Amino acid sequence: MKPVAATRKLADIISLEEQYQLATYKKMPVVAERGEGVWIYTSDGERYLDLYGGHAVAGTGHCHPRVVKAIKDQMEKLLFYSNLVYSETRARAAEKLVSIAPESVTKAFFCNSGTEANENAMRMARMTTGRENIVTFSGGFHGRTADAISATFLGKYREIGKPNVPGHLKAEFGDIDSVQAIADDSVAAVMIEPIQSMAGVKMAEPSFYRALRELCDIRGIVLIYDEVQTGVGRTGEWFFSGSDASDGVVPDIISLAKSLGSGIPVGACLVTERIASHIKENDLGTTFGGGMIAMAAVVATLEAIEGDRMLQNVREVEGYLRERLQEVEQVVNVHGRGFLLGLEFADKAKPVHESLLERKIITGTSSDPKVLRLLPPLCLQKDEVDLLVEALQKAV
């Protein structure tokens, strides 16, 4: 039983935040105070196994020592200066990010979030082609700013974003014929979440991504992969781009955010030389994008993933998790790849989500009522998988 003082403190914090903060998400009754690895510790002394990572952000785990040190060291030197000056930290971040990307990717543009990355990706595609329309897919989510939410064909989001930006066309995810029918010479880009996370962790066959690449090449269309969630190691590879799941396909632009800064807000677009050759000074701009603290976090994040062999860990632990989930009878399917997984239940997933939270395990729901999402830090271990499976067996 929680001490009365701790319970009162929890209630006070919740009351204060709800009084002064504009409503966003329906919040869990958890007051996060500190984190370490895959664990969140609350203000009342509880600890939660975090298998959601704060919307897939805590890629290296909470407060990875390498990342924390890099941020502290940078803060003591220079908090910020804009892109009007050169920066060694920014140069290192760009070099490191391009070095782990597919070979045809040559340059990086830094911004502050995933929706900004997608907005700029679409803008660069229009600049490159001189065309206006953008094709995206049913079930795709690309952000909440004007152009990005207009490119989103999932649930209520486009409705929230009205009046929508014109020039957005919808194709059916996984259906190349639906793309061929609308991708004419007015189309600047096809933008796709290669794994549709919020839609229930949906993934197409590798042949679809190959057909999409070939169609874009034939019709002079820019191909954009929205890897805000799939990028930076989440699938067990640095990127979905170029992977076997994509049949080796590399797009013209890759957008990134979420775990790129291990919790420091940062987004990026990685582009091929074809795209870079059409972008000149003052075509793009950002005040805070490429700031020193964010760039230090990017470098440290990528180095932590490499140094701790997290990509290999994701692949190994994913295999173990899939094997263990076979013991949970109500899990009828496991969607996705790496540590972007959707657990499909025979019935609604929300009661399972709530029951797991009562057992101090944080997971995520999706727009598919039967799918529970797992987006854990890349350092998740097998013994923590065992805790999940045991809890699931009790929860269902």
Image: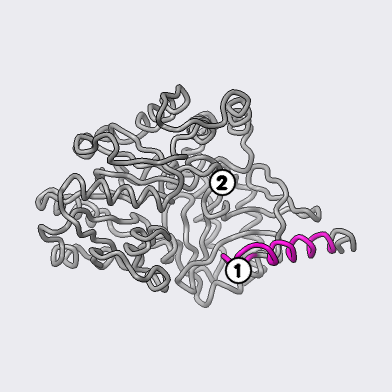
- Crowding near the residue tagged with mark 1, few <14, some 14–19, many ≥20 C-alpha atoms within 10 Å: few
Residue 313, percent from left and from top: 51, 40
Q: Is residue 237 visible?
A: no
Q: What residue is pinned by disc 2?
A: 58
The quadrant in which residue 392 appears is: bottom right
> For this view, does 100 lie left or right of residue 137?
right
Taking the spot 64% from the left edge, 70% from the top edge, the residue there is 354
Amino acid on which disc 1 is placed: Lys
Q: CA distance from mark 1 to mark 2?
A: 20 Å
Residue 171, percent from left and from top: 24, 66
Residue 128, percent from left and from top: 18, 44
Q: Quadrant of the N terminus?
A: bottom right
> For this view, does 101 lie left or right of residue 114?
left
> For this view, does 371 lie left or right of residue 186?
right
Q: Nearer the viewer, mark 1 or mark 2?
A: 1
Kindly check if marks 1 and 2 are in contact, taking CB atoms under 8 A apart as contact: no
Magenta stretch in the rendered image: 7-27
Q: What residue is pinned by disc 1?
A: 26
